[in-house]
Image (tube, coloured by chain):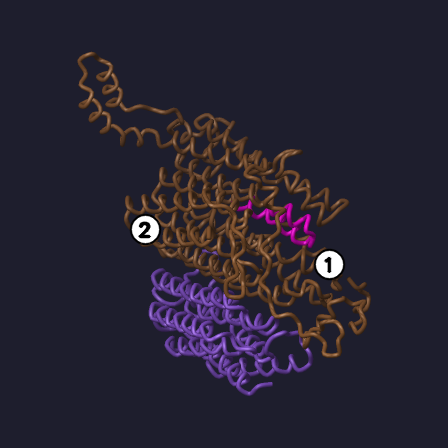
Chain colours: A purple, B brown
Amino acid sequence: MSWLLVAAGALVALGAAVAIGARATRTAGLGALVALVFTPFVADPLPPSPVLAFRIVAGTLAAFLLVVAGRRAGGGSGSPLGLPAAVATALAAFAAGLGATAIGLPSFGADEALAAGLACLAVALAPVALTRDAFRLGTALLVLANAGLLVRGALVGTAPALEAVVAGGMLVAVAAAATVLAGSAATASGGPAMPRGAAEPRRPPA
Amino acid sequence: MSLVLFLVIASLGALASLALRGRRRAGTLVGLGAVALALLALMISTPDTEVAVGGGAVALTAYARILLGVALAGGLGVLVVGRLAAWEQVGPGVLLLAVAGAGLALGIAGALPALLAVGAAATITAAAALAQPATPERVRALAREARGAVVAMTVGIVAVSLVPEEIGGLAVQPQVAGLATVAAGIALGHRFGAIPLHARVARLTDAAPPSTLPALLVLLPAAWAVILLGWAPDTLGPVEHLLGWDGALLVALGIATMLLGAFAALIQDDLGRVVAYTIVLDAGVVILGFAALDPAGRDAVRAWLLPFLATRTALVGWTIAFRAAFGTTRLSEARGWLRRAPALGAALAGIAAAAVGWPGVMVWDARLAAFGAATDGPALLLASIAGLGTAVALARVLGAGFGRPEARVVAATGELARVPAGLRAAARAARSPAGRRLATLRLASRELRPLLELNRTPLRAFLVVLLAGLALMTAAGAFGIPEAAAAPDLAPPEQAAPAPDPAGGPAATEGRAGLVATEGPGSPGADPPASGSPAP
């Protein structure tokens, strides 16, 4: 186990937790930036330098689009559980992922990628399934897509250059869709919350 | 590089069309022109040989060329029908985005990069289709669509990563194979709207502009199916699944989808919903073909997907024309419609025939071959009957056309072509000996606009008949569909081979507990098969 890989994986997990758990949209964008930029480094062997550079640029662009989405969504976003709960979830999932590889879960790639992927998955699943906040949904979808890339890297190995380029494009596409969604929700409801349907029951405020 | 040329034309056309969406005339011209140009590029191209790029391979296969060509030709017809009915600003851009995404996904070797490409295409296409105007219904539909596309892509990536194509020669742990089959089958079912995951299809039909539906509901799901069908039979097919119930679960899901989808299509009053549920019920065919994990079933579904694409695209065009003719899509409000729209009736009969086919026709044989690869006995009989649901649902719509005409049907414009009085006068003047030819031509040219306005209904009906003709041609296996469907896919990119055993034994995988040596479980040193499961 390489400590550099563990550090990169932990940074990805922490970035994902901040992206999902932060109340301020700019902080969430910063968390997404850390998670997306460090993701290509959680691989053994590392991809070639041009591929790394492309993934860093794509990750930065996706995080920037998320910041734009946050600006469009306005205030009021944020995890109902808060940042500490998201960080704790991510770290627990990261540790569990490292433990899972230690007991022989099948993998061709870096064990730390599986741990980081599980951490991203753990923090993203709840908002993907439940949230009515367009900005948080977009952020969670981006983190979930990143989780898929990490798990793929752990199970199959480092992606070839062509696939890495497509993956970078996919992250930008998801972030662009998140921006559109946040803007549309803000126009339709005046805030980040997605408008309810006529038939949907309104839950009492917590 | 036919593929690169096509992708460049489609992507630039999509960007230009979306940028000009606010300008009615320029947006129409650029959008329709770009779609026609992309179709032309496909028609004059030939299937590529594989080109190695960045550790992968890209090429325009014969099958992808036909699929994209049918999507573009049908989509162009629907766009023109839509343009003759109402202005839908994002239609051409969405179609071009979808074909570019599907082209990239089908032109790149390997299931993993293809899934990434189609996931990105599904997300961004939905965003383009539903962004404006930002009504609550559209925002909810976009959220559902983005959520579904990303989740299905992630599930598909994890499933394919558990059993990647590169290890096709190695044995796979049976539990892993079973879980991967179920996960990929459910992801595929979600993209097609299989019951109980069908809500997205119905909601999207309500929310999205009608001319974008062929791209969102038919073309992109078809691309998902081609990708996962290209992966599953070769990698999972030879594996004995320990779960046992995975195949049965998918078969049950497929048959239930066809039965319940047919029932839902039969009770709908809204024609858009009828079209949506015919798509849902045919998701069962795809799921059964996937559950077979058999190359024969895969080839059958690949062939069947092309008539599916053409018939549903034609149905969407038919619905747009119906709504423009009678001002409603509710059957109960347009009884007796056949008297005013016999050409639409003939087109609907053609579409229904193309959707299910008849014995000896490719679409019929391909559907039965997919069923036969997945199941047998009473389940096969049930699936065969349920597979006719689309024709039954469309026959009901046709039957409603024979009733006593409602008031709005009586008041509707018929399908007979009409000539404006000015044009008739110009024609008389041209025939008279004293007529001045130039002045007459100038007079006639002023009447072109009224001529178009008077004949929107017959023009729409004519285009829908053409769409039905395209559907019938694909159902009969035109364009070399059976051969293209049976042709091998692009080979997955070469990956680093497993390290050879230093002791000189067979090449062994390192660290992957689910795999055994390349000779399979019977070879010396291989893991014993799991309990209760014969080795593949």
- Which residue, given by chain and number where applicable, does mark 2 sit on? B21
Mark 2–mark 1 distance (CA, rounded to whole Å): 50 Å
Element on which disc 1 rests: loop
Image coordinates for residue B70, horizontal then vertical, percent: 49, 43
Please report the residue visible at 57 percent of the width from the left and 40 percent of the height from the top: B480
Left or right position of B518 against B329: right
Left or right position of B34 against B74: left
Residue under mark 2: which chain is it in?
B
Asked if residue A81 can be seen in this view, the reply is: no
Q: Compared with residue A89, is residue B133 higher up or lower down, i.e. above or below?
A: above
Of the pair B414 and A93, the residue shown nearer to us: A93
Image coordinates for residue B487, horizontal then vertical, percent: 61, 48
Please report the residue visible at 57 percent of the width from the left and 86 percent of the height from the top: A2
Among the two numbered marks 2 and 1 on one chain, the one whose residue lies closer to the N terminus: 2
Q: What kind of residue is marked 1?
A: Pro
Of the pair A127 and A13, the residue shown nearer to us: A13
Given this view, does label 2 or label 1 mark the residue nearer the observer? Answer: 1
Q: Compared with residue B455, is residue A156 higher up or lower down, i.e. above or below?
A: below
Q: What kind of residue is marked 2?
A: Arg
Image coordinates for residue B82, horizontal then vertical, percent: 39, 41
Q: Compared with residue B489, is residue A52 higher up or lower down, i.e. above or below?
A: below
Q: In the image as oriented, which residue stretches furthest toward the top?
A: B433
Image coordinates for residue B370, horizontal then vertical, percent: 67, 46
Asked if residue B338 can be seen in this view, the reply is: yes
> Which class describes the residues within 10 Å of circle 2: few (<14), some (14-19), or many (20+)?
many
- Whether B536 is among the magenta residues is no
Region rendered in magenta: B276-302
The kind of secondary structure the magenta stretch mainly shows is: helix
Element on which disc 2 rests: loop
- Which residue, given by chain and number where applicable, does mark 1 sit on? B238
